[in-house]
Image: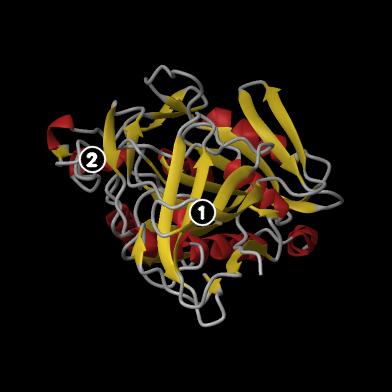
Amino acid sequence: MAISLTLLPSARCLFDEPVQVKVAGLRSNQLVTLRARSTDERGVVFNSSASYRADGSGEIDLNRDASLSGSYVGVEPMGLLRSLKADTSHKYFYKDKALEPFMVNFSVHEEEEGGILAEATNERRLIGDGVMRVPVEVGNIQGVLFTPPEGPFPAVLDLGTLMSEKRASLLANKGFIVLALPIFIGKPKLERMNLDDFEEAVKFLQNQPKVGSKGVGVISQSKGADIALSLAAFVPGVEAVVWINGCSASAVLPLYYKNRQILSALKFDMNKVISTQSGAFIIKYAMHDSLKEENKASLVPIERASGQFLFVASEDDFNWDSKAYMDEMVDRLKRHGKENFESVSYPEAGHYLEPPFGPYCHSSFHGFVGIPVLWGGEPRAHAAAEVHLWSKIQEFFRTHLDCDKTETKSKL
């Protein structure tokens, strides 16, 4: 019997779908090494490997069998994907363009350094059938709009620190019209943020012909998270905000709206950055205390917001003290008698919570601080958090941006 490596249900799938890796045709109890290999959009090669022992029938099933050694140990069906790693330190896997699939080569080898016994390529697509991708350059908006076929659909603004189409296109596959928008374009003049630019994006979304929800959702992470809070607090029509691992204040830069400053900047102290043996730094403790009297003018007044919040914090985030910011916001909303929020925290997850089944990033170069930084997180727990959060985000937006509900509300 020929040795085969099979990917089920298909070798072609969406980025956020799991595959079952099976090997057949081996000798009874044969020890082999499984490898995965992929190249990111910048040409950096990422690899992972794990050793497995075939069962009595000469078969290995990653959904059932435990890795004995290698990039991970134990039963982890998608372990080869999340443990993909570059040979050089501090590399993030760039897979941000929706039209280019994430290609992963899986192979099975005799022992550790042996030749290839069988292989298969997994094509993991970011954009589903029928989803339209349209670059948008209107006024101050420079982003990409994703529209599923037919409609109407709820609208979501996806705020990334830099431009990435990954999360937006994957959300569009689930039945949302999504505008991916970067907070920073090119090399920004880091003097202030203008909320008007993001309000323009909200209005643009509301005017799309296939949008069925009156209100707009916003999903955000890191620096984008305090922009999302500010949209909810100051801009009408923002109905649902997902805040992931960010700050509760206007971090680093003052915020302007209609040509006047509405929030001062919560400053950053480079002297509080902690160096580590890996050459990457922990910047978590470098932000000033947002609750000190002199910094309170930087806090986003989320108690003004009428929309719903989903606060998401990784307790092992090394970039921000996200859990402390989340707890502060929850306490503040409770004190104001508000119930328009839910919160979730992940004890062993790090900063970079992304759609599931991509490579875990331990550390990478931070473009704005100008040094490599540690992101935190225990890889396996972090990967599990991404799977859980991804379905939670979709459920949250479906609940609070439901097209029918919104139409009923507007009639009342």
Question: What residue is disc 2 on?
Answer: 283
217 sits to left or right of 277: right
The residue nearer to you, when weighing 159 against 291, is: 159
Image quadrant for the N terminus? bottom right
Locate residue 123, reporting x and y percent.
Answer: 66, 48
Q: Amino acid at mark 1?
A: Val
What secondary structure is found at the residue carrying circle 2? loop
Q: Position of residue 283 (x, y in %)?
A: 23, 40
Which quadrant, please, contains the C terminus?
bottom right
Residue at mark 2 to residue at mark 1: CA–CA distance: 23 Å
Instruction: Please say if the residues under marks 2 and 1 sit with CB atoms less than 8 Å apart.
Output: no
Note whether 181 is above or below 216 in the view shown: above
Q: Residue at x 71, y 28 (%)?
A: 135
Q: Residue 396: percent from the left, percent from the top?
A: 59, 63
Front: mark 2 or 1: 2
| Residue 234 visible from this viewpoint | no
Q: Label 1 crowding class (10 Å Cα cut-off): few <14, some 14-19, many 20+?
A: many
**What residue sits 70% from the left and 34% below the top?**
204
Q: Residues within 10 Å of mark 2 (few under 14, many from 20)?
A: many
